[in-house]
Image (cartoon, rainbow, N blue to C red):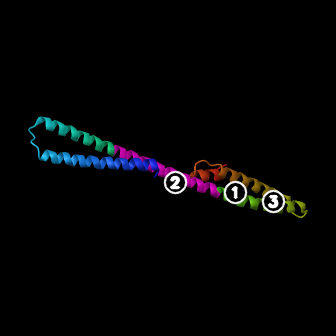
Amino acid sequence: MSINVEKNYYLFRVIYWLSLILLISLFSMIAFVDLNNELFVDRVSTCISIVFVIIALFVVGNIYFDIQQRKHIVYENKKVASNIHQAMISASNHILNNFLNQVQMVKIEAERSQDFDKRYIQIYSDAFEESIDLINRLSSINEITSEAIEESVYSK
């Protein structure tokens, strides 16, 4: 929970409890007073209305801050997932690029050899280019969902 949301959340809790204490004190005053006094009844009804407005504001404010807190948690979770995804992609790119660079040496030796079938060198070159393309497409996805990942790798 962020600091601002937390402070406002506690502020609304304090307002809520103060309004409850005020409401209880008003009800206790009503119990011990002559209800035939119209001026007192008007003041008490006004105070009760104010307390109910404060409670309603608290409830609305509490709902608002709960929604904000949930949005913040979802945002933080997405941010963490994005960071993990980027780290995995970076590490995978590093590993695959090292592997592909080392396998390039095999291709160079195959091209030097007269006994090696040139069709296999072309098959290797096509597979090499496709793997580079797939790595780049996987690295460039914006939305981290299983559908987006599958679409980036399996679609052509």
Residue, disc 1: 93
Q: Residue furthest right?
A: 114
Q: Nearer the viewer, mark 2 or mark 3?
A: 2
Q: Residue at horizontal 72%, vertical 55%?
A: 131
User: Which residue in the structure is indicated by mark 3?
Assistant: 104
Query: Real-space Cα distance between discs 2 and 3?
Result: 40 Å
Which residues are the magenta region?
Answer: 59-88
**Image location of residue 123, percent across then percent down:** 79, 57
Which is nearer the N-term, disc 1 or disc 3?
A: 1
Q: Earlier in the sequence, mark 2 or mark 1?
A: 2
- Membership of 61 in magenta stretch: yes
**In front of the other: 95 or 37:** 37
Q: Nearer the viewer, residue 9 or 29?
A: 29
Left or right position of 10 against 97: left
Compute the Cα span from label 1 to label 3: 16 Å
Left or right of 16 on screen, residue 149: right
**CB-based contact (under 8 Å), mark 2 and mark 1:** no
- Under mark 2, the amino acid is Asn
Q: Residue at x 69, y 54 (%)?
A: 135
| Secondary structure found at label 1 | helix
Q: Residue at x 20, y 48 (%)?
A: 25
- Magenta stretch, main secondary structure, is helix
| In this view, the mark in front (2 or 1) | 2
The residue type indicated by label 1 comes to Asn
**Residue annotated with mark 2:** 77
Mark 2–mark 1 Cα distance, whole angstroms, equals 24 Å
Is 96 located above or below residue 50 in the figure? Answer: below
Q: If you read the primary sequence from the N terminus, does the residue marked by circle 2 or circle 3 appear first?
A: 2
Mark 1 vs 3: CB contact within 8 A: no
* Magenta run includes residue 133: no
Q: Position of residue 13 (x, y in %)?
A: 34, 50
